[in-house]
Each structure stands twice: as C-alpha cells, then as structure tokens.
Amino acid sequence: MATVRYPIEYELRPTRLAEGEQWVWLDLQNVSDDPITQATVRLISQDASRLKTKEPDNYVPSLSPDQEQEVGFEVEAAAPTAVYISIAGEWDGAPFRWESPYIQLSVGDMVAEIASLATMTTPYPPVDEPIQVEAVIRALGHAEDLRLELWADTPSGAFERLTKVTTGELNAGDERRYPTAFTPEEKGTHTIYAYLYDGVERIDRRLEHVYVT
C-alpha cells in the first residue's frame, strides 16, 4: 500500500524477502504542484549486516507533478531489518531533502514479527513521569515460547532491561500485546528497543525514541 509523506507518495515492494540476493522496487509519485529534479534516490538499511543494498543510489532526472517513477535496488538479505528512503535534489528550483519513515522488511520464513512498538505518553514528558510502553507480537506461523525483551537506552549510556517475557504458543494470525512501563530519571533522548528471539536467534527488532524534558 502506498504511503504519502509530502511531496512524495511511495511504496516499496516486496516487504517480505527470501534470504539472499534479489531486487526490490520503489514506486515514487510527485503529489505536489511543482517539479522535483536532479534527484538522487537512496535505499538505506538500518543494519547492513542484516540487509545490504549493493548500489544504494539511483538518479531520477525529473519527476513532474503527478508523474510516477519506478526505481530498483539490488539487495542481499540475511535477516529481518528496516530500511528508509532518502531523496536529495531540487524541488521547484530550490534544494530539497526528504526521508521516509522506517519500512520494516521480513526475511525468510519468519514465524512471528514485532507488529508495533509504542510509547504512550504526553509530548516531551518530564523526568520522573512514568512512561507506558507496549509491544505487539504478530504470529506469521506456528511458534512456541518466543522471547520478547524491552530495553531502554538512556542519555547517560545506561542500557536497562524493562521486561523479559515468553509468548507461549502462537498460531498464524495471533496477536499478543505486552505492556510495561519505566520512569526516566534524566533529561534527553531515551531509545526504547524491542527484541524478539526464537531460541538464540533474534528474528525481529524495533525501536522508538522518547525525548524527556
């Protein structure tokens, strides 16, 4: 399904990959009233050890209003990760830089994924105010006793485990919610990590940022 982050509508396909070398395709559309020109389009992996883009740059000389363009990237996939799209060029004759949110990619025969990771709090929460965190696990096949761990990386560099739970038995389509909370003790950016393990293998990861004032 295409996503809009103005002035670009985009869709990366597929988002479920086999292990090894393959191509992914990016559909772009200019949804503004002004042309985008001399655009360098990049596909950037969150973790190059899990997914590597062989030639990350594509050049699009012009994208007129409502014009669509398909660009391809050859990737080597080893494990689930996330990617984002970066575009640099000119928009209506002025310098233009644009980035998409992270796009989650599954790789291989995944039995489950972290469907979402969310922090439920006010914008810029203060120190000593509890922050609710919730991870949602979605089963893609039959799985038993997966392990979910939630961690907080604090501004001072402390890496604190918030929770560790075992999922029990899951069947394809099942979704389980795992809430927890933490109380920040210092100002600055806190990064919340969710890790999902099948035995010793990490099969998915998500992260979320919270800025504490």
Image (tube, grey):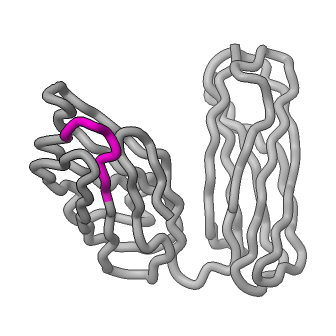
Relative to 113, 49 lies left or right: left
15 sits left or right of 21 in the view: right
The location of residue 16, given as percent across then percent down, is 50, 76
Q: Which residues are magenta?
A: 28-35
Q: Main secondary structure of the magenta part?
A: loop
Query: Where residue 131 sits: x, y (%)?
Result: 82, 31
Q: Is residue 31 magenta?
A: yes
Left of 79 or right of it: where is 52?
left
Residue 164 is drawn in which quadrant?
bottom right
Where residue 195 appears, as percent x and y from the top left, is 68, 57
Tally the marks. 0
The residue depicted at 27 percent of the width and 37 percent of the height is 33
Between residue 207 and residue 14, name the one nearer to us: 14
Q: Which residue: 19% across, 27% down?
A: 95
Residue 51: image location, x then y, percent: 40, 65
- Image-quadrant location for residue 24: bottom left
Looking at this view, is 11 or 194 the one in front?
11
Vertical placement of residue 50 versus 149, above or below: below
Q: Residue at x 33, y 62 (%)?
A: 27
96 or 56, which lies in front? 96
Q: Write the residue at 84% across / 37% down.
A: 132
The quarter of the image holding the C terminus is top right
